[in-house]
């Protein structure tokens, strides 16, 4: 597959459920529908029954204001709701209450920026707008949408509050899209408006085109993880058609994550087809400047500022601090850990970061866990670093402790249980080294011509001592022993 994406233009529309809200956008029904009995959280408003009147959820306005501020959007003091008309079984009213920035309407906020980094270079991805809208019902298919013999409808999701983030078409590769979503997820996590790790809390529509040709819109990519895959597939599909001399037409496609392909849903669909018009049942929303100030003052430190602070206060590289702040829980864990020990300085700050970003992150990824799902606590990592720096255990031994550490066992308990301590007694190491020399005459002979062969002998001492021999002492003893028998001059 081609990795040259210079001619690719991508715009993303990201729908995020405000999972921090207890109730839906226009009614008092419970918004926490996950795991609930289907069609049990409903009322005339979210079922779209005649005569029912929507009432805006004030908390939703507060959440949207938080996000607008965090994304550096230009907020609008007065915004309106519009009806987006279309029929589908997930939308009983026949229209979705959304916001519209044309025909006299205004989005919740305009513009905004998300800065990404790919291959070491920074790029500012401009946003077009963010707006509020209601979620349609949830459709459940058996297997693939294309072959399912039936569709179930669960109206519990109907009316749940969504915020849509629309980027400008300035994303130039699937990798840039992945980075964009990674940064957006981090910003959303810091604002506390949503938990995007919940299934279905984030969904993406992607507009994709090859420069100079018509675009296609891939709908309903159901998780951030799927986006990069869907984009790569769709770009390749369009390229293959062009290679065969075909003309691309504007169309709406569906990402089928079971079969991992996009399939055509409909062609020639334009904005005017939705007959947007003002929602007369809802008054315009006027947001006072002092409300915005209050939200702004309560907004926590955002990942970008936190990265600069970690870079400055803990002497971390830009790379380390950028990575560390991505997941707020990891960054909180880091700061709790390094601040728990007043003796820690730049060396330990860097060691703590390395343990978190390497061995601990790898363990979390392998077990598909978040740090809060484990029993790991900051002092364990601080203790581990102390034991290493005081020469009580080697780094190799420390790495073998990871499973126990993640289960919340203290370092001293692990050492007691495993009997693993650093061996620094020269007499013991010399005895093992002599054994290794006797058992491996061929490697010893190799040491005459190949200075690197000594590593193999040191490795054998390490394995005999189960990684407990101090590597530096072993190296110098082995060197001396080989010298004594005339192998090394
Ligand atoms: Zn309701």
Image (cartoon, rainbow, N blue to C red):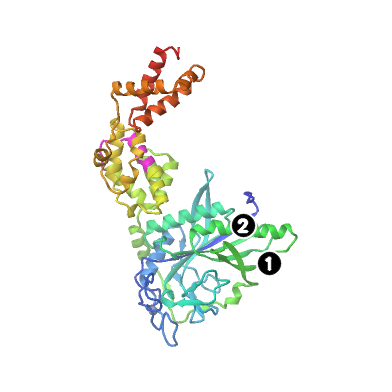
Above or below residue 487? Residue 212 is: below
- Mark 2 residue crowding within 10 angstroms, few (<14) / some (14–19) / many (20+): many
For label 2, the residue is 9
- Given residues 59 and 195, the one toward you in this image is 195
Residue drawn at x 39%, y 63% is 194
The quadrant of the rendering that contains the C terminus is top left
For label 1, the residue is 249
- Say if mark 2 contacts mark 1, CB within 8 Å: no
Q: Is residue 343 magenta?
A: yes
Return the x and y of residue 6 as percentages of the image width and height.
64, 51
Residue reaching furthest front?
439
Q: Between disc 2 and disc 1, whose residue precedes?
A: 2
Q: Is residue 213 magenta?
A: no
Tag 1's secondary structure? Answer: loop
Q: Is residue 85 visible?
A: yes
Nearest to the eye among marks 2 and 1: give it.
1
Above or below residue 467? Residue 145 is: below
- Given residues 396 and 447, the one toward you in this image is 447
Return the x and y of residue 356 as percentages of the image width and height.
37, 44
* Distance Cα–Cα, label 2 vs label 1: 15 Å
């Amino acid at each position: 597959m081609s990795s040259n994406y210079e001619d690719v233009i991508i715009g993303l529309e990201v729908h995020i459920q405000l999972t921090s809200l207890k109730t839906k956008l226009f009614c008092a029904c419970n918004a926490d529908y996950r795991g609930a009995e289907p069609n049990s959280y409903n009322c005339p408003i979210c079922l779209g029954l005649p005569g029912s009147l929507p009432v805006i959820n004030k908390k939703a306005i507060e959440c949207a204001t938080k996000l607008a501020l965090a994304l550096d959007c230009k907020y609008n003091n007065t915004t309106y709701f519009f009806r987006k008309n279309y029929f589908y079984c997930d939308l009983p009213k026949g229209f979705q209450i959304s916001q519209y920035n044309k025909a006299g309407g205004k989005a919740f906020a305009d513009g905004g920026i998300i800065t990404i980094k790919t291959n070491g270079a920074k790029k500012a991805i401009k946003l077009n707008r963010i707006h509020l809208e209601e979620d349609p019902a949830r459709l459940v298919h058996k297997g693939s949408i294309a072959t399912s013999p039936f569709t179930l409808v669960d109206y519990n999701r109907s009316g749940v509050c969504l915020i849509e983030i629309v980027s400008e078409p300035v994303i130039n590769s699937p990798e840039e899209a992945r980075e964009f979503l990674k940064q957006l997820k981090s910003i959303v996590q810091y604002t506390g408006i949503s938990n995007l790790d919940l299934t279905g809390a984030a969904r993406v529509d992607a507009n994709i085109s090859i420069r100079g040709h018509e675009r296609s819109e891939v709908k309903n990519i159901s998780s951030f993880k799927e986006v990069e895959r869907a984009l790569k597939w769709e770009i390749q599909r369009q390229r293959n058609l062009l290679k065969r001399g075909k003309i691309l037409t504007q169309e709406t496609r569906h990402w089928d994550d079971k079969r991992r392909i996009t399939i055509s849903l409909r062609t020639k669909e334009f904005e005017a087809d939705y007959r947007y018009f003002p929602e007369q049942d809802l008054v315009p929303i006027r947001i006072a400047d002092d409300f915005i100030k209050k939200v702004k003052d309560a907004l926590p430190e955002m990942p970008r500022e936190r990265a600069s602070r970690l870079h400055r206060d803990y002497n971390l590289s830009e790379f380390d601090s950028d990575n560390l702040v991505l997941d707020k829980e990891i960054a909180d864990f880091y700061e709790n850990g390094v601040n728990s020990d007043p003796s820690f300085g730049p060396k330990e700050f860097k060691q703590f970061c390395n343990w978190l970003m390497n061995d601990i992150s790898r363990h979390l990824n392998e077990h598909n866990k978040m740090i809060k799902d484990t029993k790991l606590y900051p002092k364990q990592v601080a203790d581990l670093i102390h034991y290493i720096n005081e020469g009580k255990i080697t780094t190799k031994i420390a790495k073998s402790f990871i499973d126990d550490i993640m289960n919340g066992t203290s370092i001293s308990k692990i050492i007691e249980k495993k009997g693993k301590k650093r061996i620094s007694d020269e007499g013991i190491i010399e005895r093992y080294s002599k054994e290794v020399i006797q058992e491996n005459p061929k490697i010893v002979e190799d040491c005459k011509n190949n200075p690197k062969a000594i590593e193999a002998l040191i490795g054998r001492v390490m394995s005999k001592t189960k990684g407990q021999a101090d590597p530096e002492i072993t190296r110098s003893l082995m060197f001396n022993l080989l010298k004594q028998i005339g192998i090394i001059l």
